[in-house]
Image: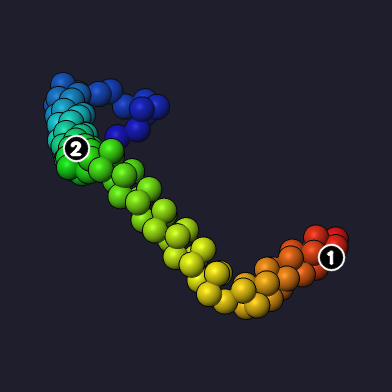
């Protein structure tokens, strides 16, 4: 049925269109509710993950301890191998110098 039809519209045609619109609205409502539930579930999962990982102070202390240990080990290695450390530093500076002057 066309909106611009010149034929008279019957009561049954109008009722049929209303029924179609009601079904379409019900389907839209159902789809929106399903998507909302999915979004809420996803948001809940993220919140639970953050809540379980809320031990920020412990993580920060652990990271600080590991960084300190890595720095101590690097210093110890540099003291044990001074020539290799100097060669490594010279190579790093040469590479940085090369990259800077390439422009």
Q: Residues within 10 Å of mark 1 (few under 14, many from 20)?
A: few
* Secondary structure state at the residue bearing disc 1: loop
Q: In the displayed structure, would residue 14 be above or below residue 73?
A: above
- On the image, numbered disc 1 is attached to which residue? 102
Residue 42 visible in this rendered orientation of the protein: no
7 or 100: nearer the viewer: 100
Disc number at residue 72?
A: none
Location of the C terminus (image quadrant)? bottom right
The earlier-in-sequence mark between 1 and 2 is 2
> How far across and down, in percent of the image, does residue 53 sit?
22, 43
> How far across and down, in percent of the image, does residue 49 sit?
20, 44
Identity of the residue drawn at 68% across and 68% down: 89
* Secondary structure state at the residue bearing disc 2: helix
Here the colouring is rainbow
Q: In this rendering, would 85 be left or right of 68?
A: right
Identity of the residue drawn at 74% across and 65% down: 93
Disc number at residue 51?
A: 2
Q: In this rendering, would 7 be left or right of 79?
A: left
Q: Quadrant of residue 57?
A: top left
Residue 75 visible in this rendered orientation of the protein: yes
Q: In this rendering, would 8 be left or right of 44?
A: right
Identity of the residue drawn at 28% across and 23% down: 8
């Amino acid at each position: 049925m066309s909106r611009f039809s010149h034929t008279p519209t019957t009561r049954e045609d109008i009722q049929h269109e209303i029924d179609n619109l009601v079904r379409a609205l019900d389907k839209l409502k159902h789809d929106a509710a399903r998507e909302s539930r999915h979004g809420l579930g996803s948001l809940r999962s993220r919140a639970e993950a953050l809540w379980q990982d809320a031990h920020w102070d412990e993580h920060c202390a652990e990271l600080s301890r590991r960084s300190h240990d890595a720095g101590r080990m690097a210093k110890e290695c540099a003291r044990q191998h001074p020539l290799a450390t100097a060669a490594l530093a010279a190579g790093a500076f040469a590479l940085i110098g090369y990259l800077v002057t390439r422009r």
